[in-house]
Structure formats: structure tokens, C-alpha cells
Image (spheres, helix red, strand yellow):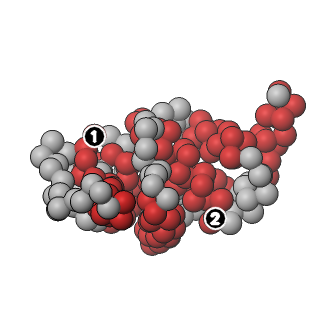
């Protein structure tokens, strides 16, 4: 186990600073996305249409509709809100010195597109990335899954999700973010 972790940390040393910033940006973005879901707002009330409980298709459609409503963004602009928050963040130049403001926003759009496509597939199978996890778990697990599709060299070569998550957590610690809450203040919802 120790030997395997040493191997992973050796891989971490080979990842470029730019790629590390992308590895940092992804869990931060997904943490913010999780926290901005409509289901987290006090006034969330799903609109429920007629459901024929004897028709499995009707039940499935209702479940998919609930997922879509509950997990949609509070204001409909998760990418703009989170990317602007990060661009204006006091630690912006320390955390993302190799990423331009346009690149931060572009990566957030790409992460959002990849995620929404994967979430749609998951919902069609009757589950969701949001199911029964904490915001931190969602951020790490989802960032890992989406970054694996993203194709970051070296990171994509690691076949085990658990091992890739060790890399993500090491990048967060390297930037002194033992907890994503340390970066994202409560005002991410505004």
C-alpha cells in the first residue's frame, strides 16, 4: 500500500503545473455545483405532474423530472457564477497562475458539458451522481470521473478511480486546501 502511494505521488510530481491547476479546478467547480442545486434552497418545491403508478414509464419520467428540477442550478448560471467567483478570488493568482481567466471559464464550461451528459446517462439508468454523498465526496468522485474523460496525460493512465482520487486529494493538499470549504466561502450561492 505504501509503495503504491509512493508510485502515485511520483506520478503527481510528473504532472505539469498547468495540469495540476485543472486537477484543482475540477473538484472546486463540482463542489460549487453541488452546493448551488435548487434542492439546497429553502423554497425548493418540485412541480409534480400526474403519475400513473401502474405505468413504469410514467414513474420513470416523474423520477427523471424530479432529478432535473432538484439538481438544476439555483440561478441557471453555475458556470458563470463559479468561474467569476474563482477569477475574482483573493487567492486566484496563487491557485491558478497558469490559467487565464478565459481558460478558467472555458474549463468550467467543458466540465459542465461533460458532467451533464454523464448525469443524463446516469439518470436514464435510474441513479444520479448526487445520490447519497456529501459535497466533498461529490466533488472528488465527480471530478475524477469527468477528468478521466477529459484526457489529462498521466492522470488518464491511472486505471483505478481510488488511485486517481489520491492524486486529486494530493493536489488539493499541495495548494493547502485540505477541505474545499477553505476556498469557497458561503457566498458561492450569490
Q: How far from the left and from the top, in percent, is residue 165? A: 64, 43
Residue at the location (55% across, 52% down)? 143
Give x and y (percent) for residue 11: 80, 47
| Residue 178 drawn above or below residue 98 | above
Task: From the viewer's side, name the closer residue of 82 and 126.
Answer: 126
Which residue is drawn at the image coordinates 60% and 55% (left, top)?
145
Tell me if 51 is positioned left or right of 109 in this view: left
Q: Is residue 108 visible?
A: no
Helix, strand or loop at label 1? It is helix
The first of marks 2 and 1 along the sequence is 2
Q: Which residue is mark 1?
A: 186
Q: Quadrant of the N terminus?
A: top right
**Left or right: where does residue 84 sit relative to residue 137?**
left
Question: Whole-percent x and y of residue 187?
Answer: 25, 45
Q: How many marks?
A: 2
Q: Horizontally, is 146 left or right of 127 in the view?
A: right
Which residue does the numbered mark 2 point to in the structure image? Answer: 149
Picture quadrant of residue 3: top right
Residue 30 higher or lower than 79, as above or below? above
Residue 77 in the image: x percent, y percent?
28, 65
Amino acid at each position: 500500500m505504501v509503495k503504491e502511494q509512493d508510485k502515485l505521488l511520483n506520478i503527481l510530481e510528473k504532472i505539469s503545473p498547468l495540469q495540476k491547476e485543472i486537477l484543482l479546478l475540477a473538484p472546486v467547480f463540482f463542489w460549487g455545483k453541488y452546493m448551488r442545486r435548487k434542492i439546497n434552497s429553502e423554497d425548493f418545491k418540485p412541480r409534480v405532474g400526474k403519475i400513473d403508478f401502474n405505468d413504469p414509464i410514467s414513474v420513470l419520467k416523474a423520477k427523471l423530472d424530479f432529478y432535473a428540477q432538484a439538481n438544476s442550478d439555483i440561478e441557471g448560471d453555475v458556470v458563470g457564477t463559479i468561474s467569476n467567483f474563482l477569477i475574482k478570488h483573493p487567492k486566484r493568482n496563487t491557485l491558478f497562475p497558469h490559467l487565464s481567466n478565459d481558460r478558467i471559464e472555458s474549463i468550467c464550461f467543458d466540465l459542465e458539458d461533460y458532467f451533464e451528459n454523464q448525469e443524463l446517462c446516469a439518470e436514464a439508468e435510474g441513479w444520479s451522481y448526487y445520490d447519497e454523498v456529501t459535497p466533498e465526496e461529490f466533488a472528488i468522485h465527480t471530478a475524477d470521473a469527468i477528468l478521466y474523460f477529459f484526457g489529462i496525460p498521466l492522470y488518464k493512465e491511472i486505471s483505478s478511480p481510488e488511485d486517481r482520487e489520491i492524486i486529486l486529494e494530493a493536489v488539493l493538499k499541495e495548494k493547502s486546501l485540505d477541505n474545499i470549504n477553505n476556498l469557497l466561502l458561503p457566498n458561492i450561492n450569490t
